[in-house]
Structure formats: structure tokens, C-alpha cells
Image: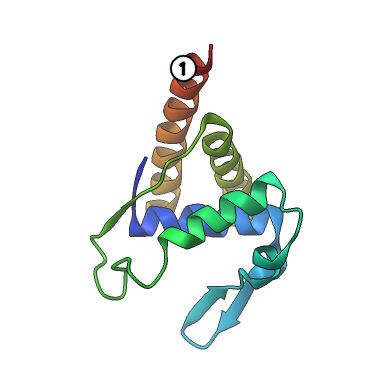
Amino acid sequence: MTFSSDELILALVSLVRATRPSMLRQEADGFSVDFEAIARSKTPGDADRLLLKMGSVMGAETPYPAKNPDSSVSLDLDAGEARQIADALAKLETVQAWPEDVMEMSRALRARLASDAAGGDEEAT
């Protein structure tokens, strides 16, 4: 699935807030995500593996929003991972007030993730 930079950040923040909120670090110019603890884990859970996968595509070689806000990133998701992100987005929509443009992006991304998850389920049968 292809994500815009903004979509990937929104998906990552949603998943972190839903599963490991302590990973978010407030900084002077925004926030950062501390992947260190889960990267060292000997028994990462499903959400941890997905967070590491998302973090890996956000690495130094990826042109990122500050440098290229119109960039996109491809992430290979299975149906369960797509559902996990969609569920995290839905949860975040209900617990925090967002500007309308962010809500629209979240809803559109959830719809695409649901479509991918449904397609993944069909392939598995």
C-alpha cells in the first residue's frame, strides 16, 4: 500500500498512541518516536513488529516531509496489519479533536486500509 508522508505519520502516531504511547517524545519542533525499546525486545508483539516495519520505511533514505512533503512511501501490509492501523486510526478519531482536513485524511486512509484488508482476506481463502 502506498502512503503519502502525512498519511504515514498519521498512521504511525495512531498506532503508537493506541499501543505504546510512551514511545512518543515531545520535542521543541514537534515530536519523535522512540523505537529503541521495541527494537531490543526479544519477543515483539504484532503491533511492535508493525511499528518497526513502519519505522524502517521512515529511515534516513526516505525523503521525508520536511524535505519533500509530497513524497510517498510503499509499505507491504498483510490484512491483519491493515486492520490494526485502521483500528488505531478509528480509536484516535474518537479520543482527540482533530482539524477537519486530518479527519478527512484519516477516514480516507481507513477506507483504503479496509479495502486492502478485505482483499488480503480473499487471497488467504
Q: In the current view of this chain or complex, which residue is farthest to the right?
A: 43
73 to the left or right of 103: left
Q: Nearer the viewer, residue 118 or 60?
A: 60
Residue 66, x across and y down, in percent = 31, 75
| 107 over 18 or under it: above or below | above
Residue count near mark 1 (Cα–Cα under 10 Å), binned few <14, some 14–19, many ≥20: few
Residue 75, x across and y down, in percent = 40, 46
- Disc 1 element: helix
Q: In the current view of this chain or complex, which residue is farthest to the bottom?
A: 28
The residue positioned 49% from the left and 55% from the top of the image is 54
Amino acid on which disc 1 is placed = Glu
Visual colour scheme: rainbow
Is any atom of residue 97 visible in this view? no
Q: Label 1, on which residue?
A: 123
Is any atom of residue 66 visible in this view? yes
Image quadrant where one finds the N terminus: top left
Q: Nearer the viewer, residue 28 or 5?
A: 5
The residue positioned 40% from the left and 34% from the top of the image is 112
Residue 72, x across and y down, in percent = 28, 54
Residue 109, x across and y down, in percent = 41, 41
Q: Nearer the viewer, residue 46 or 12?
A: 46
Q: In the current view of this chain or complex, which residue is farthest to the front?
A: 42
| 51 over 76 or under it: above or below | below
How many numbered circles does the render carry?
1
| 56 over 24 or under it: above or below | above
Q: Nearer the viewer, residue 24 or 123?
A: 123
| 101 over 41 or under it: above or below | above
Q: In the current view of this chain or complex, which residue is farthest to the top?
A: 125
The residue positioned 53% from the left and 30% from the top of the image is 79
The residue positioned 48% from the left and 14% from the top of the image is 122
In which image quadrant can residue 19 be found? Answer: bottom right
